[in-house]
Image (cartoon, coloured by chain):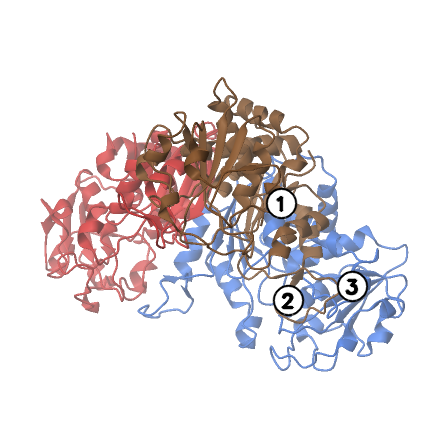
Chain colours: A blue, B brown, C red
Amino acid sequence: MKQFTSVNDVPNPKQLVESALALKRSPAGSLKGIGANKTIVMLFFNPSLRTRLSTEKAALTLGMSVIEYNAGQGWQLEFEEGVVMNGEKAEHIKEAAAVISQYADIIGIRTFPSLVDRERDYADFVLQQFMQHATVPIISLESAIRHPLQSLADWVTLEEHRPVHRPKVVLSWAPHPRALPQAVANSFVEWMKLADVDLVVTHPEGYELADTFGQDVNVEYDQHKALAGADFVYAKNWSSYRDYGKILNQDLAWMISPQKMALTNNGKFMHCLPVRRNVVVADGVLDSPASLVIEQANNRTYAAMAVLKAIL
Amino acid sequence: MKQFTSVNDVPNPKQLVESALALKRSPAGSLKGIGANKTIVMLFFNPSLRTRLSTEKAALTLGMSVIEYNAGQGWQLEFEEGVVMNGEKAEHIKEAAAVISQYADIIGIRTFPSLVDRERDYADFVLQQFMQHATVPIISLESAIRHPLQSLADWVTLEEHRPVHRPKVVLSWAPHPRALPQAVANSFVEWMKLADVDLVVTHPEGYELADTFGQDVNVEYDQHKALAGADFVYAKNWSSYRDYGKILNQDLAWMISPQKMALTNNGKFMHCLPVRRNVVVADGVLDSPASLVIEQANNRTYAAMAVLKAIL
Amino acid sequence: MKQFTSVNDVPNPKQLVESALALKRSPAGSLKGIGANKTIVMLFFNPSLRTRLSTEKAALTLGMSVIEYNAGQGWQLEFEEGVVMNGEKAEHIKEAAAVISQYADIIGIRTFPSLVDRERDYADFVLQQFMQHATVPIISLESAIRHPLQSLADWVTLEEHRPVHRPKVVLSWAPHPRALPQAVANSFVEWMKLADVDLVVTHPEGYELADTFGQDVNVEYDQHKALAGADFVYAKNWSSYRDYGKILNQDLAWMISPQKMALTNNGKFMHCLPVRRNVVVADGVLDSPASLVIEQANNRTYAAMAVLKAIL
């Protein structure tokens, strides 16, 4: 595997899931050789808790050195070609990416969308610029439009709870007080298409995903119908792609409640966290045995380990 | 030892002091096996120099991996039960503590008091919430009301200089331009009660410690009388518990001066640092051979090592 | 080597360059023993990308533990003797340096000049204070007036491209929208005097370096004359020493362009980065094979490794 920025970079996604599950069962200390004498530099243009801690844990478990750089503050990069750099931006992406490549065997990058400039966001501009100018493999720690490490961990978690039958997986939009990226939803759909599941996406009108992700996906606008018989309910808010970055709906009727879970086939509840309790999902669901959210967070480590191993 | 948040968590405090002293004498590199393949996640809700560096040094010396997270900025946790999370707070302590537990074998937490809400501070609210919801052992890196790693290092330092006779130890309040927590004083008293010393606390009226800590403690309001014949003088400012968080006194007459040290039994001077020179203590004391402050800072490392070892 | 704050600390600079080149050729993993059980604490009073990443990479490659501390925010140190510390400054350099020495085998410090108080800057006040009060070796990660790790890496890079004949090396001032320190230029001159090269410095009137650095240096105010026949062109902006910290000139005619490189002896282009494209140097130079800037950044790692090894 040459890089990890979307499922399209993965030659065999199912095998990567199996690798993560195998790494999860490995005895402590048995994996130090995999990343020995290798360094990951993790660049954060945006804050991170789970992704940072789990990827750092994964790299350390593989024996790698980890260097973190909070790129958000004061480090203003120039991305345009041929510009006269006499303004605020002190460094060009060409030098920045090439220089960091000198210190890293792998570069991890987190960069959020603007939620204002749809064209630039959906070109995954910052990530693509690093991919173009870096000379070592890039791992996405969540980009403007995808969060592949999350999706891989989600699939790993689903695999651990897969029923005998082909499972029905429902991605349900949920309300939220803030405008959030579409990245988690986009990625989840992209990966689930390959996961041998029946995928249904449910959301209010106006929250359709971009064609790149939403095409060939079964959309059911009636949340109750969508949830009927579900084996897994994945709740997530995202802002509108059509009215780009806008909040069109804050109707708490879309919240996942115990009553809604009762419509499912004894379904499991999933969310990438952090989650707004009693907005996205009711306490009664999150605190029930049906919730897999903490196991999802745990599996972030093994997802990252599988990715790092595959690249190394 | 299951956790380390106060002396009450320690089955045998004297043994822990001896363990720290033994670890201090260990040859370099001989301790890497103790923490091999173990990870400590250190959460800082408040800034830290000594505690951060010494605990990180201790963990690395034991062969542990260290992950730090500055939780202060932008990571607003919800602590209330059943609340509809549609405001500023993006994550509930239930998920936060459970998630971090997935990546850590031990979680260290630093959290200061508000100095406004006495009831909440003295319930050690944030620390208690993490203790309740985390699934791995918690180490206090200073909480609202206690600083047990400091007190353990203080005891270790005292032990290295213990006279033949039962020593007289004086904790003296000292002036300071800012309102400071009572944590160091509370903890010091709590630990010294078990250290086979004659403990005297001296402070102006109104600076009495909370009953939990102050009961059965010999208080002498006349600083000169208190210092007479002291073997150790521990200076520290704290704000009032009674008039909670208030500065009642800034009288420099309470500063520890060479003249006051002359009242002691050739006493040693101690302080947890950072210290305001010529406010808390005069240059002439701090720069004299009687000062143990740098050795206290050094012993922070061995205190942390003993604690980590006991938990692992 | 007892410390590394200027070329004057280095018993044999040429040998240090050769050590860096040898370390660059060392097989991965073969150097872990050099820094085993040793810790470097890196204090940043100012931001850093290259220096931080390369020094951290170097230390980790040598098997050291690395502890970083961003000292810039909230940690206000008192440097004056005998002062009554009842203001903003919570800790005195005497305690700070002595305490950090307890946790470190080597302390690295980055501290920029004020560009206002020339006397204090050129006394390298903060660095000198740490040197005075620390009890372990100090490495400069760039100080008010010098950047020796950069200069060592520059020399290493020059050595890799040294022609058969004694090379002509030109340090050329270049325009920049902000007032920058003189540190890189000062250090470069100081090291190149010992590097068996013909050094010429070119800059507009008023940009003369301080005597400590500029004496015995060949200055040519006509940039075209200076560049004629150059084997290496090192571009760098600095603010005026004479009119201290002032920008006297922003004339883009001083920018290094392909036309100017054509005056050289097929010369190589060097810069310490970050660099303002089309202000300091034209795209056509930076993107040409003549540019060594990325290799300079790469050699920062080996320069730091050579320094750490020599001190350990």
Measure the alpha-carbon separation of dots 3 and 1: 38 Å
Between disc 2 and disc 3, the foreground one is 3
Q: Which residue is mark 1?
A: B211
Q: Are marks 2 and 1 on the same chain?
A: no
Q: Which residue is mark 2?
A: A183
Q: Nearer the viewer, residue C135 or B61?
A: C135
Mark 3 secondary-structure assignment: helix
Which quadrant does the N terminus of chain C fall into?
Answer: top left
Measure the alpha-carbon separation of dots 2 and 1: 53 Å
Q: Which residue is mark 3?
A: A283
Instruction: Name the residue: 50% across, 19% down.
Output: B165
Tag 2: amino acid: Ala
Mark 2 secondary-structure assignment: helix
How packed mark 1 is, by other alpha carbons closer than 10 Å (few <14, some 14-19, many 20 or more), is: few
Tag 1: amino acid: Asp
Q: Please give left or right for residue A229 compared with residue A117 in the image.
A: right
Sequence-earlier tag: 2 or 3: 2
Q: Are marks 3 and 1 on the same chain?
A: no
Between disc 3 and disc 1, the foreground one is 1
Residue C210 percent coordinates (x, y): 14, 50
Q: Please give left or right for residue A170 compared with residue B116 in the image.
A: right
Measure the alpha-carbon separation of dots 2 and 3: 25 Å
Residue C172 percent coordinates (x, y): 19, 56
Q: Nearer the viewer, residue C159 or C62?
A: C62
Q: Is residue C292 above or below residue C252?
A: above
Between disc 2 and disc 1, the foreground one is 1
Q: Are marks 2 and 3 on the same chain?
A: yes
Picture quadrant of residue A85: bottom left
How packed mark 2 is, by other alpha carbons closer than 10 Å (few <14, some 14-19, many 20 or more), is: many
Tag 3: amino acid: Asp
- Disc 2 to disc 3: CB gap under 8 Å: no
Residue C43 percent coordinates (x, y): 39, 45
